[in-house]
Image (tube, rainbow, N blue to C red):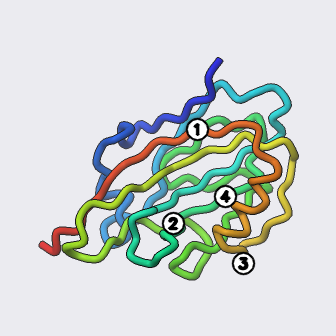
């Protein structure tokens, strides 16, 4: 079975809804995943914008330590007990919706769920996306992604 990620809020390659835009709703999207490999002990989720004009992209969401029996999050949902949200590039933990600069063209928002080989990654709400990524590098069994785009036309 293939590890897959879907969302009821947008389709892979589609437009990110207003509910997931920082200035319009700022809600994390609904996400569902299935087909995790044997040995999965927890999950992690990231949302990353590689098109941000920073030279290093922009982390919009990092979550780790989601229990292995959880395979769906509702839009804007509270996370299960034990899950940890890291610091976004907005400077605070939690979900930070799309907020590209006006006229910069469409940005990609890559949502990825990671099947993790440990119950708990050693991360905190003060950790950046890079620290989450470093920990995930050593503990990822599989990952699945979907991408949506959003453009701030300034209007």
Residue at 75% x, 53% y is 137
Q: Residue furthest bottom?
A: 91
Q: How crowded is mark 1: few (under 14 residues within 10 Å), some or many (20 or more)?
A: some
Give the number of the disc on residue 63: 4
Q: How crowded is mark 4: few (under 14 residues within 10 Å), some or many (20 or more)?
A: many
Mark 1 or 4: in front is: 1
Q: Which circle's residue, 3 or 2, is located before the other in the chain?
A: 2
Q: Which circle's residue, 1 or 4, is located before the other in the chain?
A: 4
Q: Which circle's residue, 3 or 4, is located before the other in the chain?
A: 4
Residue at 65% x, 17% y is 1
Q: Which circle's residue, 1 or 2, is located before the other in the chain?
A: 2
- Side (left or right) of 110 relative to 85: left
CA separation in Å, label 1 and label 4:
15 Å
Give the number of the disc on residue 60: 2
- List x then y, in percent, for residue 73: 57, 44
Q: Residue furthest front?
A: 55
Give the number of the disc on residue 126: 3
Q: Look at mark 1 in the image and give the residue it sits on.
A: 144
């Amino acid at each position: 079975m293939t590890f897959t990620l879907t969302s009821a809020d947008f389709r892979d390659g589609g437009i990110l809804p207003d509910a997931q835009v920082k200035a319009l709703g700022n809600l994390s999207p609904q996400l569902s995943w299935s087909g995790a490999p044997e040995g999965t002990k927890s999950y992690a989720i990231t949302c990353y914008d590689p098109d941000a004009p920073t030279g290093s992209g922009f982390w919009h969401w990092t979550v780790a330590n989601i229990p292995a029996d959880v395979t769906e999050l509702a839009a804007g949902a509270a996370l299960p007990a034990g899950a940890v949200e890291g610091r976004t590039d907005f400077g605070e933990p939690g979900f930070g919706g799309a907020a590209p600069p006006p006229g910069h063209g469409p940005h990609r928002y890559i949502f990825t769920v990671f099947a993790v080989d440990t119950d708990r990654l050693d991360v905190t709400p003060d950790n950046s996306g890079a620290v989450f990524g470093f920990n995930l590098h050593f503990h990822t069994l599989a990952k699945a992604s979907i991408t949506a785009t959003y453009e701030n036309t300034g209007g």
